[in-house]
Image (cartoon, grey):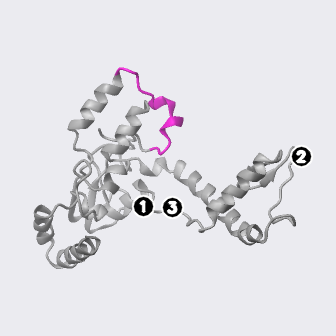
Amino acid sequence: MKTNAISLKFFIDKIGAYEPDITDLIMKMVQLCPNFLLCDGLNNMYNDVCYKCDMSLYGVFHKKITITTGFYPCVEHTPEFNYSNCLRYTEIPVLLSTLKKSKYHILYIKRRYGSCHSCYKTGNFIFIRHPTCNVHEVCKTCFKNDFLDERIKEPIAPGCMMDFHEFVDDIIENSNLQYDRFNGFLGEHGLYFDYPLDGWTNYIKEIYAGCRIYDKDRFVYENKIAKSSSFRSCPVCNERKIAI
């Protein structure tokens, strides 16, 4: 099934490059994600879109979780820290009911000639209406880089990361040290070490430097994601609330 899906995507990409209208025809005949031009999703089994779209900020599943936890869906990844978006208890069932009939997770995507409101480039691009205002359009590249945070590269964890975390938990449990991603292990006098100690096993000594580097990179990545809400809002009207 996976091979068939890859072959289908390859076929659509090849045909679409020469005959864009045929892509639309194939999308009507095959159960592709309606946001296919953005996500390349080859099914629509999750609230009429693919899994990737449903889990995204504009997806029904993501919106439902956000509303259930008492916050209005917005472009911020961490709504729990945005108390201005707190919902009244009576608003939650109303919004969930509205969400059931909503189609805003099916994005308005069109290939046309025009100018992007974000990068200002002009050409024959795939344009996407912004999921907050549902009015202004940006090109696919800007949408993926800004709204989907693809300009921020997620670090790849080494395979030994779980072993490192178990090692950290063991040290914390058996000492008065605490672990900080930048400063290593901290004691009451600010003790830290960015190198393996003599008493550690050879395996931990070997993986320590690589795991510490990843841990720091991950911390930087998470901070960039948390601070990128201004890029995810509409570049024209600056609307931040996700359309429900």
**Which secondary structure lies at badge 1?**
helix
Residue indicated by mark 2: 189
Dot 1 alpha-carbon crowd within 10 angstroms: few under 14, some 14 to 19, many 20 or more: some
Q: Label 3: which residue?
A: 152
Residue 75 lies, with reference to residue 156, above or below; the image says above
Residue 132 visible in image: no
**In the image, is 93 to the left or to the right of 193?**
left
Q: Earlier in the sequence, mark 1 or mark 2?
A: 1
Q: Residue at x 55, y 67 (%)?
A: 156
Q: Nearer the viewer, residue 8 or 103?
A: 8
- Foreground tag (2 vs 3): 2
**Mark toward the viewer: 1 or 2:** 2
Q: Residue at x 20, y 61 (%)?
A: 32
Amino acid on which disc 3 is placed? Ile
Predominant SS along the magenta part? loop
Residue stretch rendered in magenta on the structure = 76-90
| Front in this rendered view, residue 235 or 60 | 60
- The residue shown at (27%, 74%) is 6
Which residue in the structure is indicated by mark 1?
Answer: 145
Q: CA distance from mark 1 to mark 3?
A: 8 Å
Label 2 sits on a secondary structure element that is: loop
Other residues around mark 3 within 10 Å, as few (<14) / some (14–19) / many (≥20): some
40 left or right of 16?
right
On residue 196, which mark appears?
none
For the N terminus, give its image quadrant.
bottom left
Is 178 left, or right, of 162 in this rendering? right
Query: Which quadrant would the C terminus be assigned to in this image?
Result: top left
